Amino acid sequence: MRALLVAAQRAYSVDPSRIYLLGHSNGAFFAQLVANTLGERIAAWASSSGGLCTCDLRTDCAFTGRGDSCASLSRQRGWCGCSGAEKPGPIRTSGRRPPAYLTHGSSDDMVSAYFTCALSARLASAGFEVETVIRDGEQHVMPDRFAVEVWPWLFRHRLD
């Protein structure tokens, strides 16, 4: 990934202080992994329907619900409570912690919103700036306007 960033900077005159990551589902997990691996090079990142897995299997947490916040979802029957190794990789606890914008549909039956809520809490506890948006009733879909809506938030962040 480091080599890809360098190649893109050379080929496209990329501003190295404004490298952002954005992903949905598996792409969200990858954005999270890269942001935590290369935090010194990533200005900010955004995740749609990703999250922090600590369950052994994705099927260990199949929660879906209705609500527009992690707090409202966590009070509902069936809310998960897994513990184990952090996947797709450990959360950065030292060095630069790139700001994170996390969004998830509350009714996602493919990747539970629990995982985004768990990631939000874990990032906050590690000192990350985190904005979390739960989309009430939405399924496992990348919102049509996700990139457009998240762009102003991403663009407010840059490497010093």
Image (cartoon, grey):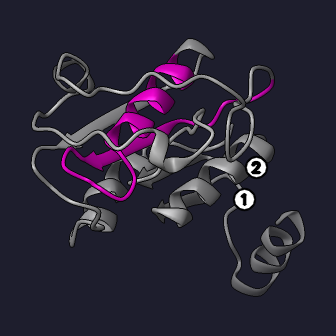
Q: Position of residue 26 (x, y in %)?
A: 54, 64
Name the residue type under label 2. Arg
Name the residue type under label 1. Pro
The structure residue drawn at horizontal position 26% and vertical position 39%, both measured from the top left corner, is 133
SS category of the residue bearing label 1: loop
Report if residue 44 is visible in the image: yes
Q: Is residue 69 above or below residue 29?
A: above
Q: Position of residue 160 (x, y in %)?
A: 69, 37
Q: Which residues are magenta?
A: 95-124
Question: What quarter of the picture does the N terminus occupy?
Answer: bottom right
The structure residue drawn at horizontal position 19% and vertical position 49%, both measured from the top left corner, is 107
| In this picture, residue 62 sits left or right of residue 2 | left
The reply to whether the C-beta atoms of the residues labelled 1 and 2 are less than 8 Å apart is yes
Q: Position of residue 75 (x, y in %)?
A: 19, 16
Check residue 157 in the rendering and tell me which mark sits there, or answer none.
Answer: none
Check residue 16 in the rendering and tell me which mark sits there, or answer none.
Answer: 1
Observer-nearest of 149 and 18: 149
Q: Which residue has dot 2 on it?
A: 41
SS category of the residue bearing label 2: loop
Q: Position of residue 4 (x, y in %)?
A: 81, 74
Q: In whole angstroms, how far apart are the C-alphas of marks 1 and 2?
A: 7 Å
User: Image quadrant of residue 115?
Assistant: top left
The structure residue drawn at horizontal position 78% and vertical position 69%, both measured from the top left corner, is 5
